[in-house]
Image: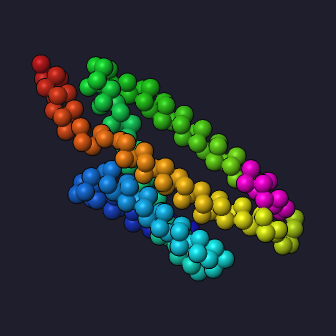
Amino acid sequence: MVSLPTMILGAILAPVLYNKFGKRKVMVLGSCITIASTAVQFVNPYNMVLFLAMYAVKGLGTMLFGAGIGTLPGDVADWSEWKIGERAEGIVTSLSSFGSKVGSGIGGALVGWFLALGHYNGAAEVQLQSALNSEIAMMIGVPMVLAFIQIVLLILWDMEKIRPNIMKELEERRNK
């Protein structure tokens, strides 16, 4: 709940920022906000006010990144049409959907694995420190690592640079 308002704000701001600064730059910014907010949370993960405040900030970063994810399959379809002459929208959309489902499944399994690794006991009144450490890793460590990976992948994603030329060539081909 605490991140919902900032995620809504991010969803509103993302298209405006994408148009002004470029999708990749804003998505990297979102990942950097996630890294910064989780780093602050890590300073004292037991301070609930700090944790929730940074979780709200993380919501903004998450949405600045996440709003662009849905547009990437369209970029791939344009690239495919330009490169091999086939838009391949169906396979691109199917792969995107499949990836989301696999990612959700792995994410759910990771929660169980982390809790098991920390010897979490749902019936215990007080959790072992190892269980708390597992929860901290899931709430802080995993998002931070994933945000770093996002940045690396976005640095490798050069579609924004070549997209204007691709769209120009595609328009020329379509008008022949």
Q: Can residue 22 be seen in this view?
A: yes
- Magenta residues (range): 113-122
Residue 117 lies in the magenta-colored region: yes
Q: Horizontally, is 89 left or right of 43 in the view?
A: left
Residue 121 in picture, x, y percent from top left = 85, 62
Residue 82 location, quadrant: top left
Q: In which quarter of the image is the N terminus?
A: bottom right
Residue 51 seen in this snapshot: no
In the image, residue 145 sits, relative to residue 93, either above or below, namely below
**Could you tell me which quadrant the C terminus lies in?**
top left
Assess whether residue 137 is covered by the magenta stretch: no
Residue 41 horizontal/vertical position (percent): 57, 72
Q: Give whichever of 59, 151 is nearer the camera.
A: 151
Q: Is residue 172 left or right of residue 52?
A: left
Asked if 19 appears above or below 175 in the picture, the reply is below
Rendered view: 105 above or below 26: above
Q: Nearer the viewer, residue 144 or 74?
A: 144
The residue lying at 72 percent from left, 61 percent from top is 134
Q: Which residue is drawn at 44% across and 26% down?
A: 91
Q: Position of residue 43 (x, y in %)?
A: 58, 75
Residue 128 picture quarter: bottom right
**In the visual, does 22 lie left or right of 45?**
left
